[in-house]
Image (cartoon, helix red, strand yellow):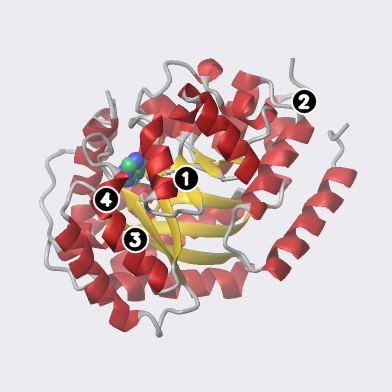
Amino acid sequence: MNAFSSDQALRDFVTGLPKAELHLHIEGTLEPEMIFELAQRNGVKLAYASEQALRDAYAFTDLQSFLDLYYAGASVLITERDFHDMALAYLRRAHADGARHVEIMFDPQTHTARGIDIETVFAGLASAMRMARDQWGLSSCLILSFLRHLSEADAFETLAQALPLREQYADLWIAIGLDSAERGNPPEKFTRVYAKCRELGFRLVAHAGEEGPPEYVRDALDLLHVQRIDHGVRSEEDPELMQRLIRQRTPLTVCPLSNLKLRVVDQMAQHNLARLLRQGLCVTVNSDDPAYFGGYLADNYTEAAKALSLQPQELGMLARNSIEASFLTANGKMSLMAELDRYLAEAPLAD
Ligand code: HPA
Ligand SMILES: [Zn+2]
Protein backbone atom coordinates (compact mmCIF):
# COMPACT_ATOMS: atom_id res chain seq x y z
CA MET A 1 0.00 0.00 0.00
CA ASN A 2 1.09 3.51 -0.75
CA ALA A 3 0.95 6.29 1.83
CA PHE A 4 0.15 8.89 -0.80
CA SER A 5 -3.37 10.01 -1.62
CA SER A 6 -2.59 10.41 -5.33
CA ASP A 7 0.21 10.18 -7.88
CA GLN A 8 0.41 13.96 -7.77
CA ALA A 9 0.86 13.93 -3.98
CA LEU A 10 3.71 11.43 -4.40
CA ARG A 11 5.26 13.53 -7.15
CA ASP A 12 5.04 16.72 -5.06
CA PHE A 13 6.60 14.98 -2.06
CA VAL A 14 9.47 13.61 -4.18
CA THR A 15 10.10 16.90 -5.96
CA GLY A 16 10.28 18.72 -2.65
CA LEU A 17 12.88 16.35 -1.20
CA PRO A 18 16.30 18.02 -1.05
CA LYS A 19 18.47 15.43 -2.82
CA ALA A 20 21.46 14.74 -5.03
CA GLU A 21 21.78 12.94 -8.35
CA LEU A 22 24.99 10.90 -8.45
CA HIS A 23 24.69 8.69 -11.52
CA LEU A 24 24.01 10.64 -14.68
CA HIS A 25 25.70 10.48 -18.07
CA ILE A 26 25.41 13.88 -19.68
CA GLU A 27 25.44 12.34 -23.18
CA GLY A 28 22.42 10.33 -22.03
CA THR A 29 20.40 13.51 -21.55
CA LEU A 30 20.28 14.29 -25.28
CA GLU A 31 16.59 14.19 -26.14
CA PRO A 32 15.68 13.33 -29.76
CA GLU A 33 14.52 16.94 -30.27
CA MET A 34 17.96 18.22 -29.33
CA ILE A 35 19.71 15.52 -31.38
CA PHE A 36 17.82 16.73 -34.46
CA GLU A 37 18.35 20.39 -33.60
CA LEU A 38 22.12 19.94 -33.19
CA ALA A 39 22.35 17.72 -36.28
CA GLN A 40 20.78 20.50 -38.31
CA ARG A 41 22.91 23.18 -36.70
CA ASN A 42 26.11 21.22 -37.42
CA GLY A 43 25.19 19.60 -40.73
CA VAL A 44 25.43 16.09 -39.29
CA LYS A 45 23.52 13.38 -41.13
CA LEU A 46 21.36 11.11 -38.96
CA ALA A 47 20.27 7.54 -39.68
CA TYR A 48 16.66 8.35 -38.65
CA ALA A 49 14.11 10.33 -40.64
CA SER A 50 12.37 11.96 -37.68
CA GLU A 51 12.46 12.47 -33.93
CA GLN A 52 9.67 9.94 -33.59
CA ALA A 53 11.52 7.36 -35.70
CA LEU A 54 14.53 7.78 -33.43
CA ARG A 55 12.41 7.50 -30.29
CA ASP A 56 10.76 4.38 -31.71
CA ALA A 57 14.22 2.79 -31.96
CA TYR A 58 14.61 3.04 -28.17
CA ALA A 59 13.51 -0.56 -27.61
CA PHE A 60 16.55 -2.00 -25.92
CA THR A 61 17.31 -5.64 -25.23
CA ASP A 62 20.46 -5.15 -23.17
CA LEU A 63 23.20 -2.64 -22.35
CA GLN A 64 24.99 -2.97 -25.71
CA SER A 65 21.83 -2.35 -27.75
CA PHE A 66 21.47 0.93 -25.86
CA LEU A 67 25.15 1.91 -26.11
CA ASP A 68 25.04 1.63 -29.92
CA LEU A 69 22.33 4.31 -30.08
CA TYR A 70 23.82 6.38 -27.28
CA TYR A 71 27.17 6.76 -29.08
CA ALA A 72 25.41 7.47 -32.39
CA GLY A 73 23.31 10.20 -30.71
CA ALA A 74 26.42 11.85 -29.26
CA SER A 75 27.85 12.33 -32.77
CA VAL A 76 25.86 15.58 -33.14
CA LEU A 77 27.92 17.27 -30.41
CA ILE A 78 30.57 19.39 -32.12
CA THR A 79 30.97 22.84 -30.59
CA GLU A 80 31.36 24.25 -27.10
CA ARG A 81 27.87 25.68 -27.44
CA ASP A 82 26.45 22.19 -28.11
CA PHE A 83 27.93 20.83 -24.88
CA HIS A 84 26.71 23.93 -23.03
CA ASP A 85 23.15 23.62 -24.37
CA MET A 86 22.97 19.90 -23.56
CA ALA A 87 24.22 20.40 -20.01
CA LEU A 88 22.02 23.42 -19.32
CA ALA A 89 18.90 21.57 -20.49
CA TYR A 90 19.70 18.74 -18.08
CA LEU A 91 20.52 21.07 -15.18
CA ARG A 92 17.25 22.95 -15.68
CA ARG A 93 15.40 19.66 -15.53
CA ALA A 94 17.30 18.42 -12.46
CA HIS A 95 16.54 21.71 -10.69
CA ALA A 96 12.84 21.35 -11.51
CA ASP A 97 12.96 17.83 -10.03
CA GLY A 98 14.32 19.17 -6.76
CA ALA A 99 17.96 18.13 -7.17
CA ARG A 100 20.21 20.35 -5.07
CA HIS A 101 23.48 18.82 -6.21
CA VAL A 102 24.41 16.69 -9.25
CA GLU A 103 27.52 14.71 -10.15
CA ILE A 104 27.78 14.48 -13.92
CA MET A 105 29.64 11.75 -15.81
CA PHE A 106 30.98 12.53 -19.25
CA ASP A 107 32.78 10.31 -21.77
CA PRO A 108 35.58 12.34 -23.40
CA GLN A 109 36.67 9.42 -25.61
CA THR A 110 33.28 9.46 -27.36
CA HIS A 111 34.17 12.95 -28.54
CA THR A 112 37.96 12.95 -28.93
CA ALA A 113 37.68 9.84 -31.14
CA ARG A 114 35.63 12.02 -33.54
CA GLY A 115 38.25 14.76 -33.55
CA ILE A 116 36.58 17.01 -30.96
CA ASP A 117 39.08 18.70 -28.68
CA ILE A 118 38.71 17.70 -25.02
CA GLU A 119 38.89 21.38 -24.09
CA THR A 120 35.71 22.05 -26.09
CA VAL A 121 33.93 19.42 -24.03
CA PHE A 122 35.14 20.79 -20.67
CA ALA A 123 34.42 24.40 -21.60
CA GLY A 124 30.85 23.77 -22.75
CA LEU A 125 29.88 21.65 -19.76
CA ALA A 126 31.59 23.95 -17.27
CA SER A 127 29.89 27.15 -18.46
CA ALA A 128 26.46 25.53 -18.05
CA MET A 129 27.35 24.14 -14.62
CA ARG A 130 28.60 27.50 -13.37
CA MET A 131 25.47 29.16 -14.75
CA ALA A 132 23.23 26.67 -12.91
CA ARG A 133 25.11 27.30 -9.70
CA ASP A 134 24.73 31.08 -10.04
CA GLN A 135 21.11 31.10 -11.28
CA TRP A 136 19.51 28.29 -9.30
CA GLY A 137 21.96 27.51 -6.50
CA LEU A 138 22.34 24.04 -8.01
CA SER A 139 25.83 22.72 -7.31
CA SER A 140 27.48 20.18 -9.58
CA CYS A 141 30.74 18.44 -10.32
CA LEU A 142 32.23 16.35 -13.12
CA ILE A 143 33.19 12.67 -13.20
CA LEU A 144 35.46 12.03 -16.18
CA SER A 145 34.58 8.47 -17.22
CA PHE A 146 36.72 6.08 -19.21
CA LEU A 147 35.11 3.78 -21.76
CA ARG A 148 35.91 0.26 -20.60
CA HIS A 149 35.55 -1.32 -24.05
CA LEU A 150 38.61 0.71 -25.09
CA SER A 151 42.16 -0.07 -24.00
CA GLU A 152 44.12 0.87 -20.93
CA ALA A 153 46.47 2.85 -23.19
CA ASP A 154 43.52 4.84 -24.56
CA ALA A 155 42.41 5.67 -21.01
CA PHE A 156 45.93 6.82 -20.09
CA GLU A 157 46.04 8.98 -23.21
CA THR A 158 42.68 10.56 -22.34
CA LEU A 159 43.92 11.29 -18.82
CA ALA A 160 47.03 12.93 -20.27
CA GLN A 161 44.85 15.11 -22.54
CA ALA A 162 42.64 16.17 -19.62
CA LEU A 163 45.25 16.82 -16.93
CA PRO A 164 46.49 20.17 -18.33
CA LEU A 165 42.91 21.43 -17.82
CA ARG A 166 42.69 20.31 -14.22
CA GLU A 167 43.49 23.63 -12.61
CA GLN A 168 41.12 25.57 -14.84
CA TYR A 169 38.25 23.27 -13.89
CA ALA A 170 39.36 22.43 -10.35
CA ASP A 171 35.99 23.57 -8.95
CA LEU A 172 34.21 20.96 -11.10
CA TRP A 173 36.36 18.03 -12.19
CA ILE A 174 36.96 16.04 -9.03
CA ALA A 175 36.29 12.40 -9.92
CA ILE A 176 36.96 9.52 -12.28
CA GLY A 177 34.47 6.88 -13.48
CA LEU A 178 34.29 3.79 -15.67
CA ASP A 179 31.38 3.02 -17.99
CA SER A 180 30.31 1.35 -21.27
CA ALA A 181 30.14 -2.41 -21.97
CA GLU A 182 30.70 -4.20 -18.67
CA ARG A 183 30.79 -7.87 -19.63
CA GLY A 184 34.24 -8.92 -20.77
CA ASN A 185 35.78 -5.64 -19.58
CA PRO A 186 36.49 -6.32 -15.89
CA PRO A 187 37.74 -3.69 -13.44
CA GLU A 188 41.23 -5.23 -13.43
CA LYS A 189 41.76 -3.93 -16.97
CA PHE A 190 41.99 -0.44 -15.42
CA THR A 191 43.89 -1.17 -12.19
CA ARG A 192 46.91 0.90 -13.21
CA VAL A 193 44.83 3.78 -14.59
CA TYR A 194 42.89 3.99 -11.32
CA ALA A 195 46.11 3.77 -9.26
CA LYS A 196 47.38 6.80 -11.16
CA CYS A 197 44.13 8.73 -10.71
CA ARG A 198 44.13 7.88 -7.01
CA GLU A 199 47.69 9.14 -6.68
CA LEU A 200 46.54 12.36 -8.38
CA GLY A 201 43.89 12.81 -5.69
CA PHE A 202 40.72 12.15 -7.69
CA ARG A 203 37.62 10.59 -6.16
CA LEU A 204 36.88 7.23 -7.76
CA VAL A 205 33.69 5.50 -8.87
CA ALA A 206 33.01 2.70 -11.38
CA HIS A 207 30.05 0.93 -12.94
CA ALA A 208 29.91 -2.65 -11.68
CA GLY A 209 27.27 -5.28 -11.11
CA GLU A 210 24.82 -3.87 -13.66
CA GLU A 211 25.16 -6.70 -16.20
CA GLY A 212 28.45 -7.99 -14.83
CA PRO A 213 28.76 -10.42 -11.92
CA PRO A 214 29.23 -9.57 -8.22
CA GLU A 215 32.97 -10.31 -8.60
CA TYR A 216 33.23 -7.12 -10.65
CA VAL A 217 31.82 -5.17 -7.67
CA ARG A 218 34.39 -6.78 -5.39
CA ASP A 219 37.20 -6.08 -7.86
CA ALA A 220 36.08 -2.46 -8.28
CA LEU A 221 36.46 -2.10 -4.50
CA ASP A 222 39.69 -4.10 -4.06
CA LEU A 223 41.57 -3.33 -7.28
CA LEU A 224 40.28 0.10 -8.26
CA HIS A 225 39.59 1.35 -4.69
CA VAL A 226 36.37 3.08 -5.68
CA GLN A 227 34.31 4.95 -3.10
CA ARG A 228 30.99 4.23 -4.78
CA ILE A 229 29.59 1.59 -7.09
CA ASP A 230 27.44 2.67 -10.04
CA HIS A 231 24.47 0.28 -10.25
CA GLY A 232 25.77 -2.67 -8.17
CA VAL A 233 22.35 -4.34 -8.13
CA ARG A 234 23.82 -7.78 -8.85
CA SER A 235 25.71 -7.60 -5.54
CA GLU A 236 22.67 -9.28 -4.05
CA GLU A 237 23.78 -12.59 -5.59
CA ASP A 238 26.73 -12.69 -3.18
CA PRO A 239 25.72 -12.65 0.53
CA GLU A 240 29.26 -12.04 1.73
CA LEU A 241 29.63 -9.04 -0.55
CA MET A 242 26.28 -7.75 0.71
CA GLN A 243 27.51 -7.90 4.31
CA ARG A 244 30.62 -6.01 3.29
CA LEU A 245 28.66 -3.29 1.50
CA ILE A 246 26.43 -2.88 4.55
CA ARG A 247 29.37 -2.84 6.98
CA GLN A 248 31.40 -0.34 4.91
CA ARG A 249 28.36 1.68 3.88
CA THR A 250 29.56 1.58 0.29
CA PRO A 251 27.03 3.59 -1.71
CA LEU A 252 25.29 2.04 -4.72
CA THR A 253 23.97 4.51 -7.28
CA VAL A 254 20.92 2.59 -8.46
CA CYS A 255 18.97 3.59 -11.59
CA PRO A 256 15.52 1.95 -11.57
CA LEU A 257 14.22 3.03 -14.98
CA SER A 258 17.55 2.19 -16.61
CA ASN A 259 17.47 -1.31 -15.13
CA LEU A 260 13.95 -1.76 -16.44
CA LYS A 261 14.70 -0.46 -19.96
CA LEU A 262 17.93 -2.47 -20.29
CA ARG A 263 16.19 -5.60 -18.99
CA VAL A 264 18.32 -5.96 -15.89
CA VAL A 265 14.87 -6.52 -14.33
CA ASP A 266 11.71 -7.61 -16.16
CA GLN A 267 9.33 -5.47 -14.12
CA MET A 268 9.77 -2.57 -11.73
CA ALA A 269 7.96 -4.58 -9.05
CA GLN A 270 10.86 -7.06 -9.18
CA HIS A 271 13.54 -4.44 -8.64
CA ASN A 272 15.69 -5.06 -5.57
CA LEU A 273 16.00 -1.37 -4.62
CA ALA A 274 13.60 -1.65 -1.66
CA ARG A 275 15.18 -4.89 -0.45
CA LEU A 276 18.65 -3.37 -0.58
CA LEU A 277 17.47 -0.27 1.27
CA ARG A 278 15.65 -2.30 3.93
CA GLN A 279 18.75 -4.41 4.53
CA GLY A 280 20.67 -1.28 5.39
CA LEU A 281 22.67 -0.60 2.23
CA CYS A 282 23.44 2.98 1.30
CA VAL A 283 21.38 2.89 -1.91
CA THR A 284 20.54 6.00 -3.90
CA VAL A 285 18.16 6.66 -6.80
CA ASN A 286 19.38 8.17 -10.06
CA SER A 287 18.40 8.52 -13.71
CA ASP A 288 21.52 7.25 -15.62
CA ASP A 289 20.52 8.25 -19.20
CA PRO A 290 17.14 9.93 -18.76
CA ALA A 291 16.55 10.82 -22.42
CA TYR A 292 16.81 7.14 -23.35
CA PHE A 293 15.19 5.44 -20.37
CA GLY A 294 11.95 7.38 -20.07
CA GLY A 295 12.46 9.50 -17.00
CA TYR A 296 14.49 12.00 -15.02
CA LEU A 297 15.34 11.97 -11.33
CA ALA A 298 11.86 12.52 -9.89
CA ASP A 299 10.40 9.93 -12.30
CA ASN A 300 12.86 7.36 -11.00
CA TYR A 301 11.80 8.05 -7.40
CA THR A 302 8.07 7.98 -8.19
CA GLU A 303 8.12 4.90 -10.45
CA ALA A 304 10.13 2.97 -7.88
CA ALA A 305 7.89 4.22 -5.06
CA LYS A 306 4.72 3.10 -6.84
CA ALA A 307 5.99 -0.35 -7.84
CA LEU A 308 7.75 -1.09 -4.56
CA SER A 309 5.39 0.70 -2.14
CA LEU A 310 8.15 2.90 -0.79
CA GLN A 311 6.96 4.84 2.25
CA PRO A 312 7.63 8.58 2.78
CA GLN A 313 10.23 7.76 5.39
CA GLU A 314 11.99 5.44 2.91
CA LEU A 315 11.98 8.09 0.21
CA GLY A 316 13.51 10.40 2.80
CA MET A 317 16.15 7.75 3.48
CA LEU A 318 17.02 7.56 -0.24
CA ALA A 319 17.43 11.33 -0.35
CA ARG A 320 19.55 11.20 2.84
CA ASN A 321 21.73 8.49 1.29
CA SER A 322 22.23 10.60 -1.84
CA ILE A 323 23.58 13.44 0.28
CA GLU A 324 25.77 11.12 2.37
CA ALA A 325 27.17 9.39 -0.76
CA SER A 326 27.87 12.64 -2.62
CA PHE A 327 31.24 14.34 -3.00
CA LEU A 328 29.97 17.51 -1.31
CA THR A 329 32.13 18.93 1.47
CA ALA A 330 31.28 17.98 5.06
CA ASN A 331 29.68 21.41 5.53
CA GLY A 332 27.73 21.10 2.29
CA LYS A 333 26.39 17.72 3.37
CA MET A 334 25.45 18.98 6.83
CA SER A 335 23.44 21.92 5.60
CA LEU A 336 21.61 19.84 2.98
CA MET A 337 20.86 17.14 5.57
CA ALA A 338 19.45 19.82 7.88
CA GLU A 339 17.19 21.03 5.07
CA LEU A 340 16.06 17.48 4.44
CA ASP A 341 15.27 16.98 8.12
CA ARG A 342 13.20 20.17 8.17
CA TYR A 343 11.38 19.09 5.02
CA LEU A 344 10.57 15.65 6.40
CA ALA A 345 9.34 17.13 9.68
CA GLU A 346 7.04 19.56 7.88
CA ALA A 347 5.96 17.65 4.76
CA PRO A 348 2.22 16.95 4.92
CA LEU A 349 2.61 13.30 3.99
CA ALA A 350 5.44 12.32 6.30
CA ASP A 351 4.29 10.02 9.11
O1 HPA B 1 24.15 2.34 -17.70
C1 HPA B 1 25.25 2.40 -18.26
N1 HPA B 1 26.12 1.40 -18.11
C2 HPA B 1 27.32 1.42 -18.70
N2 HPA B 1 27.71 2.41 -19.47
C3 HPA B 1 26.90 3.44 -19.67
N3 HPA B 1 27.08 4.55 -20.39
C4 HPA B 1 25.97 5.27 -20.28
N4 HPA B 1 25.08 4.63 -19.49
C5 HPA B 1 25.66 3.47 -19.09
ZN1 LIG C 1 25.50 4.56 -15.94
- Quarter holding the C terminus is top right
| x and y percentages locating residue 187 in the rendered image | 31, 46
The answer to whether 326 appears left or right of 58 in the picture is: right
Badge count = 4
- CB atoms at circles 4 and 1 under 8 Å apart? no
At 28% from the left and 74% from the top, the residue drawn is: 162
Label 1 crowd bin: few (<14), some (14–19), many (20+), radius 10 Å: many
Mark found first going from the N terminus, 1 or 2: 2
Residue 256: numbered disc = none
Q: Secondary structure at mark 2?
A: loop
| x and y percentages locating residue 248 in the rendered image | 61, 45
Mark found first going from the N terminus, 2 or 4: 2
Q: Amino acid at mark 3?
A: Tyr
Mark found first going from the N terminus, 3 or 4: 4
Q: Which residue was labeled with disc 2? A: 4
Label 3 crowd bin: few (<14), some (14–19), many (20+), radius 10 Å: many
Q: Is residue 32 visible?
A: no
Q: Amino acid at mark 4?
A: Ile
Q: Which residue was labeled with disc 1? A: 229
Residue 35: numbered disc = 4
Nearer to us: label 3 or label 1 = 3
- CB atoms at circles 2 and 3 under 8 Å apart? no
At 34% from the left and 72% from the top, the residue drawn is: 122
State the CA–CA distance, disc 3 to disc 1: 14 Å
| x and y percentages locating residue 249 in the rendered image | 62, 44
The answer to whether 152 appears left or right of 313 in the picture is: left
Q: Secondary structure at mark 3?
A: helix
Q: Amino acid at mark 2?
A: Phe
Q: Which residue was labeled with disc 3? A: 194
Q: Secondary structure at mark 1?
A: strand
Q: Amino acid at mark 1?
A: Ile
